[in-house]
Image: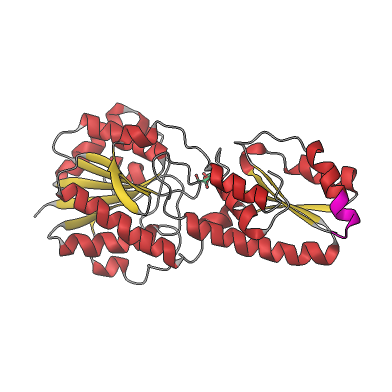
Amino acid sequence: MKNIAILCSGGDVSGMNAALKRFVEYSIGKGLRPYFVDHGFDGLIDNNIYEACYSDVAGIISRGGTKIHSSRSKRFMEQSYRKQAIDNLKSHNIGYLVVLGGDGSFKGMQALSDESEGLSFAGIPATIDNDIAGTEYCLGVDTALNVIKYAIDSIRDTASSFSRAFVIEAMGRESGYLALVSALTSGAEMCLIPEIPYDLDNYKSCFQKQRIEGRDYFIAVVSEALKNSEEVAQWFEEELGVESRITVLGHIQRGGNTTVYDRLMAFHFVTQAINGLLEGNKSSVICYGDGGFNHKKIEEVAYKKYQINPELLKLGREFGCHI
Ligand code: F6P
């Protein structure tokens, strides 16, 4: 019987636990012995590796976060620690490793793959930032978008009651995906993202006209990378005479009850990863696009820059959102 392990690396997402459940159940169904690595790549180095069973994944399907913890391991950048990790995997007779994470995690997986023989690796894109080139979807994005949707809908209630402008800061690192899709689907008046240069003065006359026509509150969604919430809030006060407030959504965006879509995607990603390993793939990332899954080389995914979808920008502008 071959042994297979799974770990979570980088920012946690809601959907990781659903993936762990599928991992244990599908592995056993395929005649494999499943292992958990606790605390990501740090856990590999420290040999926090244990055999998983059905009871480990009972009752976790709905819960955000990850039962096996995650980490952003600095030690893993050093070859000596990676050697330790490989030795630990071998000591448990583990031949397959599934890594849930973002592009940094896949670079770590690539290094392991280059330095080990007899081990095979599969990556599953899991980051709320949705910023991995080569895949249209990363696990956790739908849940994060729904958390943001609830937050903005609630903020709209108070914004409209008090005739205020709200500047809402979304996560995403250097990616504007969460901010853009949230602005678009929440009917925000403004969306500022790192991919698109902006000049607030270009929006002034349009917003003034809207004020004259009766609009008395505004919702602006901005990406955290721009660090401009104060500037935008001040602009609403000084240029449009609208009292403003800032809401930084922060880490609530990473947690929460996993949506149906993320549960299904977790199942599919894991199934694809295990099937790929059993078919002989040595080192690949499972990507989603055009309605299906494909297995790509790590270089095609981790070392390319993610691009924002121009169709989303077009749609947002058609809805009257100032981007
Ligand atoms: O990559 C996921 C993410 O949530 C980013 O959107 C955010 O910038 C970052 O992680 C926050 O990291 P930490 O949880 O380490 O503060």
Q: Is residue 169 visible?
A: no
Is residue 20 in view from this perspective?
yes
Instruction: From the top left corner, tell me how far across and down residue 29 is, in percent.
Output: 16, 64
Q: Quadrant of residue 21?
A: bottom left
Quarter of the rendering containing residue 59: bottom left
Q: Which residue is drawn at 63% across and 50% down?
A: 316
Closer to us: 52 or 179: 179
In the image, residue 255 sits, relative to residue 309, either above or below, namely below
Q: Give the range drawn in magenta.
A: 209-215
Q: How is the image coloured?
A: secondary structure
Residue at left offset 13%, top offset 47%: 93
> In the image shown, does 253 or 292 lie closer to the viewer?
292
Is residue 175 toward the left or the right of residue 164 in the image? Answer: left
**Drawn side of residue 134 relative to residue 55, left or right:** right
Give the residue drawn at x 69%, y 66%: 154
Count every numbered label the image shows and give the total. 0
Q: In this view, does 20 lie above or below 128?
A: below
The stretch drawn in magenta includes residue 211: yes
Magenta-colored stretch includes residue 37: no
Identify the residue at the far bottom of this view. Answer: 59
Quadrant (top left, top right, bottom left, bottom right) of the N terminus? bottom left
Quarter of image, res 108:
top left
Residue drawn 73% across the image and 52% down it = 189
Front residue of 235/109: it is: 235
Q: Which residue lies furthest to the left in this view?
A: 1
Q: Position of residue 64 (x, y in %)?
A: 45, 61
Is 55 drawn above or below residue 9 in the view shown? below
Query: As drawn, is 321 to the left or to the right of 10?
Result: right
| Figure quadrant of the C terminus | top right
Residue 49 appears at what percent x and percent y?
25, 50
Q: Position of residue 2 (x, y in %)?
A: 11, 52
